Amino acid sequence: MSLDPITLSVIQAGLQQVCDEMDLSFSRAAFSPVIAEANDRSDGIYAADDGALIAQGAGGLPVFVGTMQYSTAELIRLIGEGRAAAPEPGDIYIVNDPYLGGTHLMDVRFVRPYYRDGKLWCWLSNTGHWPDTGGAVPGGFSASATSVEQEGLRLPPVKLFKKGVMDEEIYAIICSNIRVADQRIGDVKAQAAALDVGADRLDLLLGRYGDDTVAEAITELRRRASAQMRQMIATMPEGSWQSVAYVDSDGVVDEPLEIRLGITRVDDRLRFDFAGSSPPCRGPMNSVLATTLSSVYLAMRHIFPEVPISAGAFEPLDITGYEGTFLDAHYPRPVSGCAAEVSQRIAEAVFAAMVQPLPDRVTAAPAGTSGNFALGGHNAERGRDFVMYQLSGGGYGGNADGDGLSNGCSTIGISKAPPVEIMEQAFPVLYHHYALHEGSAGAGRTRGGFGLDYELELRNGNAKASFVMDHGRFGPQGALGGGDGDVNKVVVFRDGESYVPLHLSKEQDIPLESGDRVWVRTPGGGGYGDPLERSAALVLEDVRLGRYSIDQAADLYGVVLSDSVKADGSGVPTLDEPGTEAKRAEMRAAR
């Protein structure tokens, strides 16, 4: 059988649509704001024999593009070895073990076998970020865990649903080990329902085009994705490029961790070598291998977005040198920061190397942190406990085409911060402000985007705050002469006194009482190109909008502005062209 291009395209879109509808169903039915509002979830279709990625929802987190196929492959392996129960129609496995193709414990994966005429045809899988899976810290983001047991309940692949019916005993075990357990049933049912939707939509697609035709299309799409990635790689010059990215600390030892990367192009393949990166760390900034590999894949998706999402797209990418480093975590290394933070440092290292041969395609470093902030405690007004999880955006890197996006989602996902109004309704908090982190963008011919600046107050009761963030010590890297973005900043106000965590943006169990406040400012993106080449008019506009001060315009860009003060005290900046020319000449001479 030979598929015509139109049929192939329609089937490709149909598979994507199946995943998109799973994503939409999951978010609409979920209880937790982190899924329902922030969309911290993903759904996909995976091959029956090896778990290879067939399709993933466009609105799902890109970091899961790799991890979910490895998780499905691990399930298939365990079934084959008799260490997991064989599948039957209507079964749904639950697993969050990070060492079995996962991320951190809060990313809980459901996997459902999909049958046609009694034969396993593929697997449907999704991942949802649960607000809590037990452990030492509400929300699971322990900043100083030294073993995975301290991070929460670890589940191997077990059947939570058997022939369509939830196993109440397994669910009771889960609920007995997590906080606010009574609220989890809403997320569990939503996650399972999304897979039901996927099965129904896949029935329709196969019924319309036939099982054999769709199977042939999947094989051809994988082949073409591989060929397209090879073609994109072939546009690069032959050579090798190096980069280094830093994790602030592991949360336990206050020293930076290094990600050293060398990328080499040979013919139509790329080799990513992480040899020389830091050894395994004591704290939770270790990365399991599935997350490390997926981080490289998602970075390449940013660089070559034309290549379809498929296992074939990753075949020309060879990843080595991670053995013996903190990028290849094994039990019992703690890993709560791997997906949300370390994965973004890995992507940053890829960007910093790839911008050298592909300056027109690759950006300066983005904010590169998910801004994980968990607040768990007791709501005195409602008489019940709560666990709040807040993620936040930051600035994107500048690029050849323009300035970076301000307050964009993280490198690893399309998830967005939940609306302030939803958070205030669901939890005993009040946001005092929620605005751009002014002055945070890295300077460049095209500047980075600006980060986020927010402050919230605990309105009643008591709680404990925990942070697992990054880029508090080093700002996101500029590219091709651009400046670094500003760093992440956390300040806690208790009893009228301010407190900055020792590890800057990592700490756990900070006690809060009613009236205490938390102030977070996320990083801006790195700048791209020489800042002295930026249009003075664009700098003036940023100052006019309050994004930079007049002094910053002079210090970063050599743009001299005068501030004409009106009678009411307001100032209107105007450009001093001769002063700007002289200032920029002085700055160039000083280099």
Image (cartoon, rainbow, N blue to C red):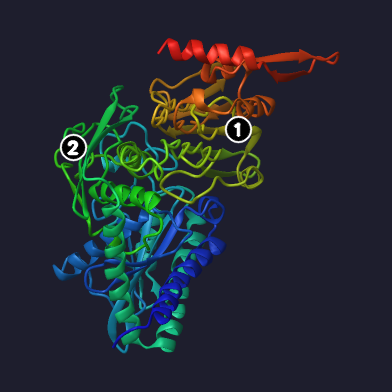
Percent coordinates x, y for residue 121 in the rendering: 30, 80
Q: Is residue 39 left or right of residue 15?
A: right
Where the C terminus falls, by quadrant?
top left
Indicate the amino acid at tag 2: Thr
Q: Is residue 356 above or below residue 416?
A: above
Local secondary structure at mark 2 = loop
Q: Is residue 402 left or right of residue 361?
A: right
What residue is disc 1 on? 436
Where the N terminus falls, by quadrant?
bottom left
Q: Is residue 153 above or below residue 167?
A: above
Dot placed on the residue nearer the N-terminal end, 2 or 1: 2
Does residue 61 appear in this view?
yes
Give the residue at x 43% y 59%: 42
Give the residue at x 39% y 32%: 479
The image quarter containing residue 472 is: top left
Which mark, residue 325?
2
Indicate the amino acid at tag 1: Leu
The image quarter containing residue 6 is: bottom left
Please identify, in this view, whether the residue under mark 2 or under mark 1 is nearer the observer: 1
Q: Is residue 552 above or below residue 268?
A: above
Local secondary structure at mark 1 = strand
